[in-house]
Image: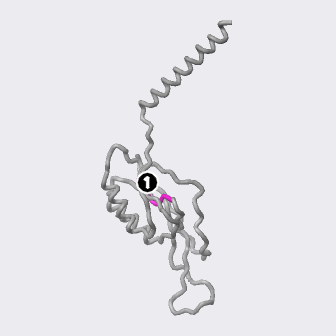
Amino acid sequence: MPPIFYKQPIPVNIKAPKGRIVPLQAPQIHLGKSLVALTAHRISSTALTNLRMALKRYLGKKNEFLVHCHATYPVTKKPDGIKMGQGKGAIKDHVARIPAGFVIARIPQISPFMTQKSIYVALQRVTSLLPIPCQFRSQQNNFPSQSLAKITMLKDQIDLRRSLEWKRKHLSI
């Protein structure tokens, strides 16, 4: 499979209200091994860069991975020693607002027949870098080619049975 290139969104330097993290409408399902957030939380851009660097280090150049969250939401902070009032502070950092059940990172297209402990070790070490509790999820496409042949054979038998029943019913009169 060719490498996956994705250009992440650019953070906007406009002050925004704190707001709330909007929950997911439906669960996210991706093939392969993925890291899923268990609670809603904000993750800073430094934590996400540490996550990317750690995944690169543990997985090496052969395995590709995708990080689905990007720090685009601005966070403001007043400087130390400033009294309350006089407006909102300057933009300090950017964060990613992550709802519960959101897939943070994923490693696509891993064969279910190969047991790769290094991937689980890498995902386990990466979870210690994140400020939220995470869970591993594995989703495979289990459609073996032999089952397709069986399904088509069963459908042919059902069609043959129906046609014989129709002939008996309508032509015997």
Q: Which residue occupies the foreground of this view, 85 or 28?
A: 28
Q: Is residue 114 above or below residue 45?
A: above
Residue furthest out toward the top: 173
User: Residue 15: x, y in percent?
Assistant: 60, 77
Our reading of the magenta stretch's main secondary structure is strand
Q: Is residue 105 magenta?
A: yes
Q: Quadrant of residue 141?
A: top left
User: Residue 55: x, y in percent?
Assistant: 37, 61
Q: Give the structural element (helix, strand or loop) at label 1.
A: strand
Q: Is residue 61 magenta?
A: no
User: Residue 109: x, y in percent?
Assistant: 41, 47
User: Residue 20: x, y in percent?
Assistant: 60, 70
Indicate left or right for 50 with 73 as reference: left
Q: Residue at x 52, y 21 (%)?
A: 156
Q: How is the image coloured?
A: one colour
Magenta span of residues: 102-107
Q: Which residue occupies the foreground of this view, 88 or 169?
A: 169
Residue furthest out toward the right: 173
Indicate left or right for 121 with 107 as reference: left
Q: Which residue position is annotated with label 1?
A: 137
Q: Which residue occupies the foreground of this view, 2 or 157?
A: 157
Q: Is residue 161 above or below residue 48?
A: above
Q: Residue at x 51, y 59 (%)?
A: 101
Estimate how packed mark 1 is, as few (under 14), some (14 to 19) or many (20 or more) residues with alpha carbons within 10 Å: some
Q: Quadrant of the C terminus?
A: top right
Q: Residue at x 60, y 15 (%)?
A: 165
Q: Amino acid at mark 1?
A: Arg
Q: Residue at x 52, y 88 (%)?
A: 79
